[in-house]
Image (cartoon, rainbow, N blue to C red):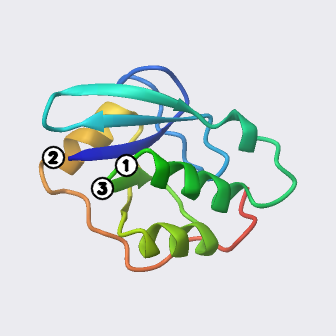
């Protein structure tokens, strides 16, 4: 099982980026192997529009089962939900903390977007 995390850095100690569509990177953690890979999201950092949808499409291409982030807007949430990708919101400070919360069952699956579109 693979889980994507919005990240501001290059490893598990990186701060969890609170934004989904404009997150700097996605850290994709493989729970079965205990390994991770990074996916760059810089093309969406300064996008005039569509950052959430484009980021959601990228997450779909990464073949993950879930996404852990602080916030996810409505259009991105719809794309992820349609692809069967579960979204988990957290206020964890780092990717490692968010991963630990996920592993321990401390994160609840979101049933709707938690911010309006074009949230910064």
Between marks 1 and 2 in the image, the one whose residue lies nearer the viewer: 1
Kind of element beneath mark 1: loop
Q: Looking at the image, is mark 3 or mark 2 earlier in the sequence?
A: 3
Element under disc 3: loop
State the mark number for residue 119.
none
Q: Closest to the observer: 36 or 22? A: 36
Q: Real-space Cα distance between discs 3 and 1?
A: 7 Å
CA–CA distance between discs 3 and 2?
Answer: 14 Å
Q: Sequence-wise, which precedes: disc 1 or disc 2?
A: 1
How dense is the environment of label 2, judged by Cα within 10 Å: few (below 14), some, or many (20 and up)? Answer: few
Image quarter for residue 120?
A: bottom right
Q: Position of residue 96 (x, y in %)?
A: 30, 32
Q: Residue at x 47, y 66 (%)?
A: 80
55 shown above or below 29: below
Disc 2, SS: helix
- Which residue occupies the extreme bottom position in the image? 111
Disc 1 target residue: 63
* Residue for badge 2: 103
Horizontally, residue 103 falls left or right of residue 93, namely: left
Q: Is residue 13 above or below residue 49?
A: above
On screen, residue 112 versus residue 8, left or right, reads: left
Task: Write down the residue under mark 3.
Answer: 65
> From what the image shows, is residue 112 above or below residue 3?
below
Q: Residue at x 31, y 46 (%)?
A: 3
Seen in the picture, residue 71 relative to 111 is either above or below; the reply is above
Q: Marks 3 and 1: which is nearer the front?
A: 1
Mark 1 closeness class: few <14, some 14–19, many ≥20 residues within 10 Å: some
Return the x and y of residue 1 as percentages of the image width and height. 20, 47
User: Which residue lies at the image location 43% right of the left edge and 73% below the top edge?
Assistant: 81
* Residue positioned most to the right: 48
């Amino acid at each position: 099982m693979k889980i994507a995390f919005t990240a501001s850095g290059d490893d598990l100690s990186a701060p969890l980026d609170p934004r989904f569509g404009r997150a700097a990177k996605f850290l994709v953690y493989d729970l079965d192997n205990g390994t991770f890979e990074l996916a760059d999201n810089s093309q969406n950092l300064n996008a005039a529009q569509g950052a959430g949808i484009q980021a959601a499409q990228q997450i779909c291409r990464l073949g993950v089962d879930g996404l852990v982030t602080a916030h996810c807007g409505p259009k991105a949430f719809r794309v992820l939900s349609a692809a069967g990708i579960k979204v988990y919101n957290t206020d964890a400070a780092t990717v490692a903390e968010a991963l630990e919360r996920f592993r321990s069952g401390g994160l609840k699956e979101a049933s709707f977007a938690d911010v309006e579109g074009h949230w910064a």
